[in-house]
Amino acid sequence: MKKAAFTLSLLLFSAAFGAMSVNLAKANPAPLFSFPTTPVLTPPTIIVTSPVHNKICNTTVELSLTIVKPETWFGIDVGSHLDGSPINQAFVNISSVYYVVDNGERQNIAVHDITSLWDTTPTLTLNLSTTLPLSVGAHRVKVGLEADSYFVVSFTYNLSEALSSVKLYAESVPVNFIVASELEIQLSSFPILPVAVFIVAVVVAGAVLLVHYRKRRKKKNASI
């Protein structure tokens, strides 16, 4: 969707928003009435579910995330179709999702958010994933997004209405994790503490037996 503002004529009830199609014939007669007059800037919540913070991963890391949209991004039940079904509107469209590893270059994740501003099914969450082939060692990943927030601008000189948009940005909390080889992962899962306790117990038992043996030997020598 292009960043430039675009004009919607109330006489024609049609508009073009780049790749976004709008079928106003099914919408209410005044599709802009429920749109805000200032941009909605409430950020979404980006939750990285994989990798897990401060955990060890293998060399093929799955980056999984959930984007939770605020309800302020939508106009719910703002009108109805001829059959009585509700009309819902979306004021914000996510245009780009990306991630950055170790302060490197931005890498985009394919995303398709909404297809219509005027007649849409509100989806409050987006689940995305991609693979991160990384080298062994410590890493840090952060996810971000860009969205277009649409709002109404009034022009009194010709009694028309138009939509304009501003960019909305959001980022996740950085996730620190360690990539290890299969051998390192196996060694890290080895029960070190129980084994250490067992070794200590064996050493102590051996020392006790040795002391006991020496005492018995001294007594035996003394009796001769």
Image (cartoon, rainbow, N blue to C red):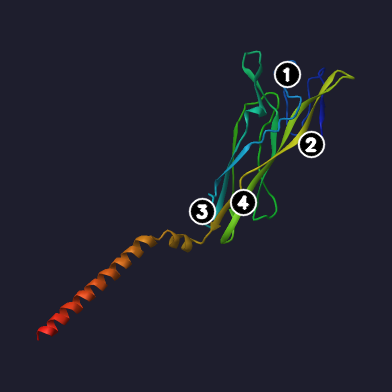
Specify the label residue 3 is tagged with.
Answer: 2
Label 1 environment density (alpha carbons within 10 Å; few <14, some 14–19, many ≥20): few
Mark found first going from the N terminus, 4 or 2: 2
Mark found first going from the N terminus, 4 or 1: 1
| Residue 116 found in image quarter | top right
Viewed as shown, does residue 119 lie left or right of 161? Answer: left
Q: Residue at x 37, y 61 (%)?
A: 193
**Secondary element type, mark 2:** loop
Depth check, mark 1 against mark 2: the one in front is: 2
Q: Amino acid at mark 2?
A: Lys
Q: Amino acid at mark 3?
A: Lys
| Residue 161 found in image quarter | top right
**Which quadrant does the N terminus fall into?**
top right
Q: Distance from label 3 to label 4 (Cα)?
A: 13 Å
Can residue 17 be seen by looking at this rendering? Answer: yes
Specify the label residue 141 is tagged with.
Answer: 4
Specify the label residue 55 is tagged with.
Answer: 3
Q: Residue at x 86, y 18 (%)?
A: 159
| x and y, in percent, of residue 135 in the image | 59, 61
Q: Is residue 73 above or below residue 195?
A: above
